[in-house]
Amino acid sequence: MMDILFDILVWVIVFLSVLLLGFWLYLTSERMKEVSRLQKIDRYIEEKQHKWYRYFKGEEPFSDELIPKHKHEIEGIEKIFLVYLKNISSTEIQDKIRDFSNRYLMDHYQRLLDSRKWSRRMNALYRVADFQLYRLVDKYREMEKKKLTHEENFQLLKIYSMFEPDLFIEKIANTMKLSEFEYKKLLTGIDPNTRERLMTCFDQLPPACQYSMIDTIGMIRNMDSIPFLEAQLDHSDAEIRIRSLKALHEIGIIVNLDRYIPFVTSDIWEERLMAAKLLQNVPLKGSLSYLEKLLKDESWLVRTQAALAIEK
């Protein structure tokens, strides 16, 4: 009996050893493939980055030599393009990257969008937005027929904001519910025309989107948005009123002082605080009487802000 148990134990040890060896060989093989892939990408970048630079700078015309023939060349091109997009603000370079990508990289990203692996699909969606692959619009619509993750749907929204503004507005108003952070990521990247269209349907937007839109307007400091923000000062939602006051303060221009005076005596301390901040943008001759009233406010923050406005 002991001999049988011993033989079984030996076979188990041998089996596990062979299994571990096979696993180690597999990992080693995969690691070698990955190292080889990265080396090929690095070699491509080293050999072609100067040629790309001269093409982007207009120092030499486009060459067929830049058209990728292998996957590692596409990955090298990705890295080169991303460096330029993140570090150099040039419409001419952006246009060249967009045109090249739509002509020579479209098939590659279309295959990735069909992948069963989530990571590959997401990577493709990121690059689609970075490189502005507008020729794949039909593919994006086709993807929506499948069950997508929240991250994929969000990235598709970003893509629609670039290429399909009508669909973007429809979806952001009626379909997806996002966090304020996500709404801000979308709204900071839209063009002025799309932003104006969203203003016209502001009341149909989800509350989180409304809040984010007001914050975004304040962040970009667009003077043309002052009438829109002032209109929100009559909104029934106090949060919208407060954020609109904050956005107006960030823009820093008071067109009609009388529009803000009622907030000096508001029942909501945050509105009184924002009134004190806004009065900083008014000559002391016109704001002193209101600031003196705020100096007696029950809120320490309001009193402090009023004092700072007088001292400025």
Image (spheres, rainbow, N blue to C red):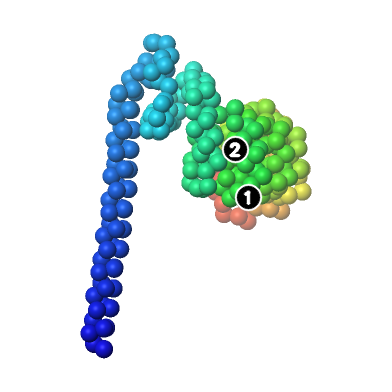
Q: Would you identify the image quadrant in which residue 263 lies?
A: top right
Read off the residue under disc 2. Answer: 158
Read off the residue under disc 1. Answer: 147
Amino acid type, residue under disc 2 in the picture: Lys
Is residue 66 visible to the viewer in this orientation of the structure? Answer: yes
What x and y, as percent, mark residue 20?
28, 62
Of 139 and 210, the residue lying toward us: 139
Left or right: where does residue 298 sit relative to residue 35?
right
Categorize mark 1 by other alpha carbons within 10 Å: few (<14), some (14-19), many (20+).
few
What x and y, as percent, mark residue 57?
40, 15
Q: Which label lies toward us, 1 or 2?
A: 1
Count of marks placed on residues: 2
What x and y, as percent, mark residue 9?
26, 78
* Separation of residues labelled 1 and 2 (CA atoms): 18 Å
**Residue located 64% across and 47% down the image:** 146
Left or right: where does residue 177 sit relative to residue 78?
right
What x and y, as percent, mark residue 201?
76, 37
- Whether tag 1 and tag 2 are in contact, CB under 8 A, the answer is no
Is residue 302 visible to the viewer in this orientation of the structure? Answer: no
Q: For mark 1, give the secondary structure.
A: loop
Please determine whether, in this image, residue 216 is positioned above or below residue 266: above
Q: Would you identify the image quadrant in which residue 252 lies?
A: top right
Give the mark, 1 or 2, whose residue is nearer the N terminus.
1
**Residue located 65% across and 39% down the image:** 142
Q: For mark 2, give the secondary structure.
A: helix
Of 251 and 286, the residue lying toward us: 251
**Residue located 52% across and 37% down the image:** 111
Amino acid type, residue under disc 1 in the picture: Lys
Of 263 and 235, the residue lying toward us: 235
Q: The N terminus is located in which quarter?
A: bottom left
